[in-house]
Image: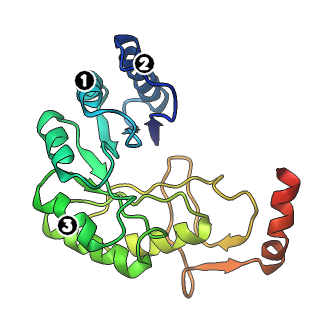
């Protein structure tokens, strides 16, 4: 089992009370998944470095798998500063599109886990290139994915072909309309089977797809 606690968007003051709130939130998440579950914390690029450094030291006892998106991409010096001060593994990559954008993280050794998104980057080919590049630096991937089950199926296919895989993101409710007939499933413990069959291992229900705009209107 795995669960990801996250920051913002919300009012933020950086006070001791705010620190206590986040620590309790993460402690409650750990209790919910139990000692054998995985807990991650998504900073969403929303927490200033001084606050995140303080918070990271306080949540260490809860065995956090990684802190996601510790800073906005673009200034590698911020990532280097955070990596020097934080003992919990750091992860990023969902906003980066190509091998050229992830390469500085690896060269500067300031990220422990890369999170390419198959739907955001150049698809399966670019995701595999990023994974191969990360492998050369012994950095695992934890693919980001908030796409429909079509996008997740593509990501699972790519992930199954690389050796340095840690964990995969999946939100069953990302797209409510059952447009995709998938050939894979996720069990109660969070383990996914692999897509089966030709192509991505899915079929598109064209009738549902044609009605999708109307379905969205009815729900809004």
Image position of 210 with respect to 17: above or below: below
Residue 31 coordinates in the image, percent (x, y)? 44, 24
Label number found at residue 103 = 3
> Residue at 28% across / 77% down in the picture?
129
The quarter of the picture where residue 47 lies is top left
How packed mark 1 is, by other alpha carbons closer than 10 Å (few <14, some 14-19, many 20 or more), is some
Q: What SS does tag 3 mark? A: helix
How packed mark 2 is, by other alpha carbons closer than 10 Å (few <14, some 14-19, many 20 or more), is few
> Residue at 45% across / 23% down in the picture?
25
How packed mark 3 is, by other alpha carbons closer than 10 Å (few <14, some 14-19, many 20 or more), is some
Image position of 59 with respect to 69: above or below: above
Q: What SS does tag 2 mark? A: helix
- Ranked by sequence position, the earlier of labels 3 and 1 is 1
Whether residue 136 is visible, yes or no, is yes
Q: Please indicate whether residue 139 sits to the left or right of residue 45 in the image.
A: left
- Ranked by sequence position, the earlier of labels 1 and 2 is 2
Whether residue 163 is visible, yes or no, is no
Image position of 13 with respect to 186: above or below: above
Question: Does the CB distance between marks 2 and 3 fall below 8 Å?
Answer: no
Q: Residue furthest top?
A: 17
Label 3 vs label 1: CA separation? 28 Å
Q: What SS does tag 1 mark? A: helix
Q: Please indicate whether residue 128 sits to the left or right of residue 180 in the image.
A: left
Q: Which residue is mark 1?
A: 54
Label 1 vs label 2: CA separation? 14 Å
Q: Which residue is mark 2?
A: 24
């Amino acid at each position: 089992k795995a669960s990801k606690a996250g920051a913002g968007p919300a009012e933020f003051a950086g006070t001791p009370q705010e620190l206590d709130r986040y620590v309790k939130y993460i402690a409650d998440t750990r209790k919910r998944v139990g000692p054998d579950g995985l807990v991650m914390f998504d900073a969403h690029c929303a927490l200033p470095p001084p606050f995140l450094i303080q918070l990271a030291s306080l949540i260490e006892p809860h065995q956090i798998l990684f802190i996601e998106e510790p800073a906005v991409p673009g200034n590698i010096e911020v990532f280097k500063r955070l990596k020097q001060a934080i003992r919990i593994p750091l992860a990023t990559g969902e906003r980066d599109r190509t091998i050229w954008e992830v390469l500085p993280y690896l060269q500067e050794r300031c990220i422990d886990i890369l999170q390419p998104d198959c739907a955001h980057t150049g698809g399966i080919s670019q995701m595999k290139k990023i994974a191969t590049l990360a492998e050369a630096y012994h950095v695992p991937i934890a693919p980001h994915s908030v796409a429909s089950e079509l996008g997740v199926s593509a990501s699972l296919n790519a992930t199954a072909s690389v050796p340095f895989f840690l964990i995969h993101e999946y939100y069953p409710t990302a797209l409510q309309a059952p447009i995709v007939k998938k050939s894979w499933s996720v069990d109660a413990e969070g383990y996914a089977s692999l897509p089966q069959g030709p192509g991505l291992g899915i079929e598109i229900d064209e009738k549902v797809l044609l009605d999708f705009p109307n379905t969205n209107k009815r729900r809004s």
